[in-house]
Image (cartoon, helix red, strand yellow):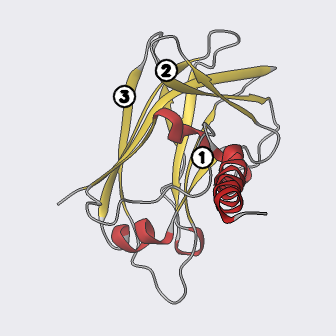
Amino acid sequence: MRDRIFFPLAGLLVIMMVFVALQPGIGQLPTGSVAGDGVNYDRIAIEGPYLNKVIAGGEARTKIQALPDKRYVLQIDAEADALADAPELGPHFRLAPDIEVQFSGQKIRVTVRARPALDQGAMEMRVNYSTGRSGESGWRVFALQPDYADFSFEYEVPVATGEQAVDYIAVRPVVPTKRRGILVESIVLERLP
């Protein structure tokens, strides 16, 4: 085969192989731990497609929804008595080690923007910041509004000792009977002075 034909065909084959290798990730929503940007840890926002980083845990059901106005919301549904009390055994976001280090020994504000689900909406939601072995904020219960509203609490994150634990932000509907759900538009973690 002549070089004029071989090298262009070989180059085209390499380009096609790279495209085929990248193709499964194109258009996929992000997954994994919530990480900071490496520069500014004063405000970490989990919103838009990053709401897909939720881990359902337990018997909860989570679903990300793209709205016509290009916003995303996270729907969290659960049955009555289906979720254990431990934050990591229900719907939660795992925080990456860089955020754990930055928040260690700091006072933070957790703000969840949420509302009841359209079908079988919960009247209340529970939120918890857990530092794994070092402690947790305890469940904070908020009465939901008919439309999206911000619900906040402050927590003094204990100083990390020894090996890093795994920090979680757990969000779930309060489910007294049957099935209930909430819609989460964003979660913001702010480091306070």
| Neighbourhood count class around disc 1 (C-alpha, 10 Å): few under 14, some 14–19, many 20 upward | many
Q: Quadrant of the N terminus?
A: bottom right
**Which mark is on residue 150?**
3
Q: Check disc 1 and report the residue beneath it.
A: 53
Q: Quadrant of the C terminus?
A: bottom left
Query: Viewed as shown, does residue 157 lie left or right of 24?
Result: left
Residue closer to the observer: 11 or 174: 11
Give x and y (percent) for residue 54.
62, 44
Residue closer to the observer: 128 or 191: 191
Q: What amino acid is found at the position of numbered circle 3 in the picture?
A: Asp
Helix, strand or loop under label 3 = strand
In the picture shown, does residue 166 fall above or below 154? below
Helix, strand or loop under label 2 = loop
Give x and y (percent) for residue 157.
39, 66
Question: Can you see residue 55?
Answer: no
Q: What distance separates the C-alpha of mark 3 from that of mark 1?
A: 20 Å
Q: What amino acid is found at the position of numbered circle 1 in the picture?
A: Lys
Front tag of 3 and 1 = 1
Q: What distance separates the C-alpha of mark 1 from that of mark 2?
A: 23 Å
**Which mark is on residue 144?**
2
